[in-house]
Each structure stands twice: as structure tokens, then as C-alpha cells.
Amino acid sequence: MTDAKTLDLWFDPLCPWAWMTSRWALEVAKVRDVDVVFHVMSLSVLNEGRDLSPHYRDLMDNAWGGARVCLAVQQQYPEKLTELYTALGTRIHLGKEPNERATHEAALAEVGLPMELADAGDTDANDKALREEQAKVTAAVGDEVGTPVIRVGDQSLFGPVMSPAPKGEEAGRLWDGFVNVLAYPGFFELKRTRTVDPIFD
């Protein structure tokens, strides 16, 4: 099996599937010798210029703020990004709070970060850096996938997409299999139709 010590995971804070995978990743870190490192990506950037349904276009228009705030934290307080993502994702995905400034401020306050970081969500001033982060993801896995994206060593894949996120040793066993699949550079896709929505437990 691949000697994997670091799990890099790219997320957009608005995506419930990335949230599920992130909870699995943190569970893996409890039962395997794995360090989880989160990075921001942007579904809004990924979908720029695409022909989207009105509903999904609204989602993408709304996704900018959270990703911008998370990127500001990644740049200025990288050691706090995991905590912020947990605080923000708990509000958005479990609490059903909107991806807007008040939610960003509450999450920042919870983890002890300056309130002015919420300003990043209201401006496109740092979108060049956000596009550069998304470009890293696209270079690794292409532009036909979304979030999450995981990298172990020099191999990256979209996913895994799961619901609910496994816990304990079950999370570890899924990790063991995932690492083995990821290690083969000729592996590209493994998929079945989703039959459940995200189950937040």
C-alpha cells in the first residue's frame, strides 16, 4: 500500500458533498497516520462562462463570498483554515444558514479570527488568486469534475463522494482502499448513480 502521510483536500465551502468528504477525511486522521490539509477551490470560477440552469447559476453566483473569505484565511492564517471550514460548514450545511456576510462573520468570530476578513467576501479584488487556486485543481484533475478533489503524493482524484460520511475504523478502511486506487496512475473513474442526498449526522 502507498505510504501516504498527507491528504490534501480542495473544497468550495458551499458544496455539501465536499463537506461530507471533509468530515470523512478528519475522521481518517483519527484512525490512520494521516495529516489532512485543506485548500480552497471555487465552483464559481470553474463554472464561469458555462451554460447553466437558472437554479445552478444562482448557486454559483452565491458561492463567491464563502470561497473568497476562506481564501483570505488560507493566505493570512493558514493554520486556522480547518477550524474556519468546520465552523462555516456547520452553519451552512447543518444550520442551513445562508452563504452571506453574517454567516461568515459568525464563523470567523467562533474561531477567533478578525472580523475584517469578512470584507474579502464582498469584493473581487483577490479573485486572481482564487482563479490561480482553481487552476491548480484543473491542472491536476481536469475541468470535468467539481469538488472535493483529493491529492495524496503526486496523484489526485475528484471525490470520493459519499453519504453519510463513515466514522471510526470504517472511515479508515475506506481510506485504505481509496489510497490503493489513487496510487495507480492509470485509474480515472469509478461511479454509480447517487440515490441519497447528503446525510449530515
Image (tube, helix red, strand yellow):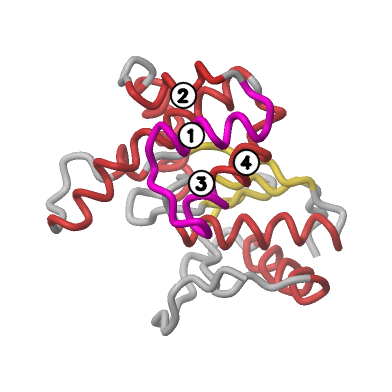
**Quarter of the figure with residue 22:** bottom right
Which residue does the numbered mark 3 point to in the structure image?
Answer: 11
Do labels 3 and 4 touch, CB within 8 Å?
yes
Q: Residues within 10 Å of mark 4 (few under 14, many from 20)?
A: many
Q: Residues within 10 Å of mark 3 (few under 14, many from 20)?
A: many
- Residue type at mark 2: give it: Ala
Do labels 1 and 3 touch, CB within 8 Å?
no
- Residue type at mark 1: give it: His
Q: Is residue 65 above or below residue 199?
A: above
Image point 37% across, 29% down: which residue?
Answer: 131
Image point 81% across, 51% down: which residue?
Answer: 34
Could you tell me how far apart the alpha carbons at marks 4 and 1 are, in whole angstroms? 18 Å
Which residue does the numbered mark 1 point to in the structure image?
Answer: 104
Label 4: element kind? strand
Q: Is residue 159 above or below residue 34?
A: below
Query: What secondary structure is the stretch in magenta mostly built from?
Result: helix
Dot placed on the residue nearer the N-terminal end, 2 or 4: 4
Could you tell me how far apart the alpha carbons at marks 1 and 2 are, in whole angstroms? 6 Å
- Residue 67 in the magenta stretch? The answer is no
Q: Residues within 10 Å of mark 2 (few under 14, many from 20)?
A: many
Which residue does the numbered mark 4 point to in the structure image?
Answer: 38
Could you tell me how far apart the alpha carbons at marks 2 and 3 are, in whole angstroms? 18 Å
Question: Which region of the structure is painted magenta?
Answer: 89-113
Which quadrant would the C terminus be assigned to in this image? bottom right
Image coordinates of residue 176 in percent, x first then y, are: 76, 69
Could you tell me how far apart the alpha carbons at marks 3 and 4 are, in whole angstroms? 7 Å
Could you tell me how far apart the alpha carbons at marks 2 and 4 are, in whole angstroms? 19 Å
Which quadrant would the N terminus be assigned to in this image? bottom right
